[in-house]
Amino acid sequence: MVEKALWLKAVFGKNGMELTAEQVSQLSEYVRLLLEWNQKVNLISRKDEENIWERHILHSAALVLLFDFPAGSKVIDIGTGGGLPGIPLKIFRPDLELLLLDSTKKKIDAVSAMLSSLELQNISAVWGRAEELATLPQHREQYHIAVARAVAQLPELIKWAEPFLVEKSQRNIVSSENKIALSLPTLLALKGGDVSKEIELAKRKFRTFDIQEYALQFEGAEPLEENQKKVVVVNYLRG
């Protein structure tokens, strides 16, 4: 566990980001908890347990290694499952405010228990269907960024995410030299394999939205490249 955590710290270092000792400790504890809960609730594939750092934590880390998240952004993780990518994202970027959403109660119960153990601030988990929660005032048009990982086909995911996102962002977006700026509001969908048909269908259905696919290419990304991991970015250009 420690060896893998230090490996991830080294990956961050190669990409111009530093993980503190506290962040490394939190990540290690999260992985321990996730594996423990996976024995009771199906949160990740059992065959992935030995490669959890490469296939799950690094995949989540790709979001902050590739993209600039404006400071203090409100983020919703749709279909969080075992807290991915939301919990790692919160550990990497403590300034973000996170809501983790899943329609399976036993998964949210597990995630809530993990959050309690980790003692993270400004992050919560809620059980419910995206279509229903998006109608509630405390969630509708309250988030700058939606993230999702292997949840649904892209057109359906775009439809789920839209009601949660703010109509227009008032934030100043400043891009670093090595990262991609996010034009808010936006959806970041972590995907694997060939997603060209999903993207084509989404572009036909949502003609006013800007939809782009990015390969997860950065120093240390080889495990992701081997499995054809990528992220689809959807900018909600309304009106």
Image (cartoon, helix red, strand yellow):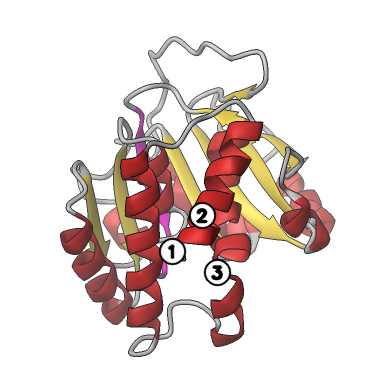
The amino acid sitting under disc 2 is Ala
The amino acid sitting under disc 1 is Gly
Tag 2 near tag 1, CB within 8 Å: yes
**Which x, y percent locates residue 182?**
56, 25
Q: Residues within 10 Å of mark 2 (few under 14, many from 20)?
A: many
Q: How far apart are labels 2 and 3 at the CA level? A: 18 Å
On the image, numbered disc 2 is attached to which residue? 148
Q: Is residue 77 magenta?
A: yes
Q: Residue at x 32, y 71 (%)?
A: 33
On the image, numbered disc 1 is attached to which residue? 79
Q: Residue at x 66, y 13 (%)?
A: 177
Label 2 or label 1, whichever comes before in sequence order: 1
On the image, numbered disc 3 is attached to which residue? 52
Name the residue nearer the viewer: 52 or 128. 52
Q: Residue at x 41, y 69 (%)?
A: 81
Name the residue nearer the viewer: 191 or 93. 93
